[in-house]
Image (cartoon, rainbow, N blue to C red):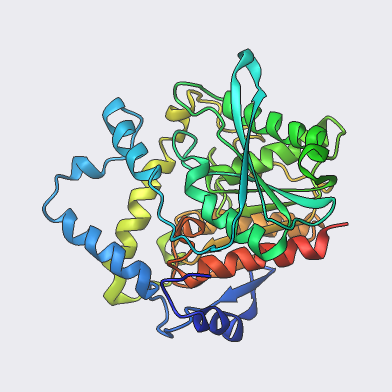
Amino acid sequence: MLRKYPESLVDDIKKKQEVVLVDEVEVLLKHIPDGDIKGAMDPRLYKEMKKMALLSNFIPKSMFKMDSSPKSLVRLRKIFNSVDSYPMVEEEIRTTKFLIKASGSYDMPMYCFKSEAPLENAPILYFIHGGGFFAGSVDVVTEALKLFVANTNMIACSIDYRLAPENPYPVGHEDCYTGLKWIHENAARFGGDPTNIFVAGDSAGGNLTQYCTNKSLEDGSHLVRGQLLLYPTVNMGGVKDEHVHFSKEKFDIYSKHSKVINMSLGMFDDLSGSLGDFLGTKDLMNKYLTPYLEVSSDLPPTFITVGEHDFLKIETLAYARKLTLAGIDTTTVVYKGLGHAYIDKVGYYPQSEDCVLEMIDFIGKHRK
């Protein structure tokens, strides 16, 4: 494996981790491997964000605006579509592209990743990329999926669903569920086990993941063996109770890093408030766009992770609490010093590699 950090840092994350209780929920807390300052940003992330903070002094504030205007959409897609991983995996991972029929006779690309020696009847990870429902692609998470496959000889699949606003809600959500059903029906074509499908997604992809799981429960197909929600969007409707209410007082912020941390929290909070405009709907207070509203006790085992300084941390931990209290077997992992979208940084952040390893452990525990 190739890395932009010493492999020992991944070991250090494991050595320093601890289980803590947060609002009635057991949380596996992952400390910064090479730092111990409370509320500090990881040094690798801080280096990147500091550059952005310096640039913000010379760039008009309008350039940082995150809304659904055509001008902003072009700029945001350029940012969200960038591939920020480092090519870690040296072995050959075979990628097969399928075109599957979605609504409106749309040919939707599905990519399946396999090693040279895959497990027989292998469990399948179906990963749904994030990007605010309006951006992102399989390319952004490909290295993370290759890392998963290289470490397990399991199969990973991912889909390029149709994006908003050109395709308003619920098109993208339905596309992802179509993908899940296709994987179940066609698993044998690529050596997968249709009874061992794990659905995962990051950010908006976490919302799409929960949608797939909920729809599978509703139609009685029960296709999902387990779900993995990476810093998911679960409260678009803006429910405000004592657990999910957003407040910066709920974040530990090291004073010397406060400018970059607050900048990050503010930028993404603006974007979160515009998601309904991107999706083309004002009905955000429903159980699909705001799954925090309703948690079924029939949900499968769930892995949920978030960064300490992610603007979605509060709703993610509140959702983990709801899942736990509903009796769902829930694994909750928090990375100190990180913000949003760390699965995209495989090869650059040791925590990103550790996150993939935690996902592997979760699937290993819950597969048939």
Give the residue drawn at x 80%, y 52%.
122
Front residue of this view, candidates 121 and 138? 121
Q: Is residue 325 above or below residue 288?
A: below
- Find residue 356 and report its horizontal and vertical position in percent: 61, 63
Give the residue drawn at x 65%, y 34%.
288
In the image: residue 95, left or right of residue 2: right
- Find residue 279 and report its horizontal and vertical position in percent: 49, 28
- Find residue 108 and report its horizontal and vertical position in percent: 60, 26
In the image: residue 57, left or right of residue 201: left
Can you tell which quarter of the image residue 360 is in? bottom right
Q: In this view, does 27 lie above or below 303?
A: below
Front residue of this view, candidates 220 and 83? 83
Q: Residue 18: tell me if it is visible.
A: yes
Give the residue drawn at x 44%, y 25%.
165
Front residue of this view, candidates 265 and 146? 146
Q: In this view, does 353 lie above or below 183?
A: below
Q: In this figure, what is the number of numbered marks?
A: 0
- Please identify the residue farthest to the top as the structure is shown: 104
In the image: residue 52, left or right of residue 36: left
**Could you tell me which quadrant the C terminus lies in?**
bottom right
- Please identify the residue farthest to the left as the structure is shown: 58
